[in-house]
Amino acid sequence: MNIVIIIPTGIGAKIGGHAGDANPVVKLFSPICDIVITHPNVVNASDINEMPENAWYVEGSILNRFLNGSIKLKQPLSNRILLVVNEITNELHNAVAAARHTIGARIDILKLDHPLIMIGKIDENGASGEVCGWEELVDQVWGEKFDALAIASPIQVSKEVSLNYFRHGGINPWGGVEAKASHFIADALLKPVAHAPTLDADPELRNFNEVVDPRMAAEVLSSAFVHCVFKGLHKAPRISDKGLAYKDVDCMITPHGCYGPPHKACHDAGIPVIVVKENTTCFNQSVPEDFIFVENYLEAAGYVMAMKAGIDPISVRGRALNNDRL
């Protein structure tokens, strides 16, 4: 049983839209699946990442390619990680050393000749932003020896927006532009890529120490923010002409109200898509009628267990999940 769990970045998902707060979701499905494929946003929690051993950490654009059948994925024993940064700070130096001696990962660090500039924005469509310098980044790392690329750089978000998010919630203002940068760079390199923000220069944000919504607590207590990326990239699957194919995926699980390239790819391929109604977003997009709607992730896990056991879910319910067949 192989499944995909997506929670699109920057659309205010109630579960998984903050700082790795969907780690328990992935851990819920882990014991009942052979492979749980997900993307960095779902499990990245700054200095925390609780993804289980059978979770595959796949950048969003690479996941789209996989689901539309243009590539296959193969998990290595480990990846050689290259960390690129605008500046090599003490926090980042210590983060690399810590990952080497706890995860056991091989990590090299490289200062960029041209800084990567990322500006986070929020509008009626959610979180997005502008990315400058990514092409120069790709050119600089092209000749380096590495299997997966970690990026640690600042994200420019106004102090007012940052404090408002920490104190009142809403849409994570950093995630959208992170996904955008990762998409650009992964598409160019065709290798696993993930980004982590570095500490804000503003003293009030750098020393922020207030009690926050539990879903964003990992963001506040972290110092280097990049350990989650090291853990995810350590064994992140590589693009391959042999390995796991889209036809090996048994179902995909998604929040309610969003529809994008992975949904369309699964629908076109006949892969069942399970929509979790409790996990709302800032969108209310329509989806195909043959998607499977469940109330929450606990019910979704039951549906996956029924699929794995070859049981028609209707046979263990007093009524059909969608339309009565009788």
Image (tube, rainbow, N blue to C red):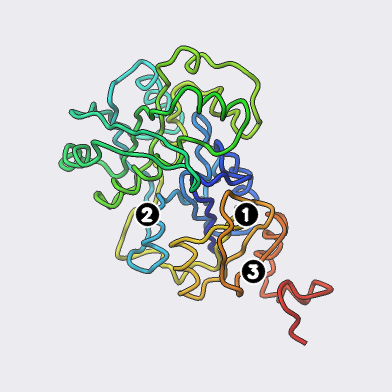
According to the image, label 1 marks what residue? 29
**Label 1: few (<14), some (14–19) or many (≥20) C-alpha neighbours in 10 Å:** many
Can you say whether 56 is above or below 246 in the image?
above
**Label 2: few (<14), some (14–19) or many (≥20) C-alpha neighbours in 10 Å:** many
* Residue type beneath disc 2: Ser
Calculate the distance from the C-alpha at mark 1 to the C-alpha at mark 2: 23 Å
Picture disc at residue 204: none
Nearest the camera: 34 or 314?
A: 314
Going 74% across and 84% down the picture, which residue do you hit?
325
According to the image, label 2 marks what residue? 61
Can you say whether 163 is above or below 70 in the image?
above
Classify the position of the C terminus by image quarter: bottom right
Calculate the distance from the C-alpha at mark 2 to the C-alpha at mark 3: 24 Å
Place of residue 292 in the rendered image (x, y in percent of width and height, measured from the top left) = 64, 69
**CB under 8 Å between discs 1 and 3:** no
First in residue order: circle 1 vs circle 2: 1
Can you say whether 50 is above or below 162 in the image?
below
Q: In the orientation shown, which residue stands out farthest toward the bottom?
A: 326
Q: Nearer the viewer, mark 1 or mark 3?
A: 3
Picture disc at residue 292: 3
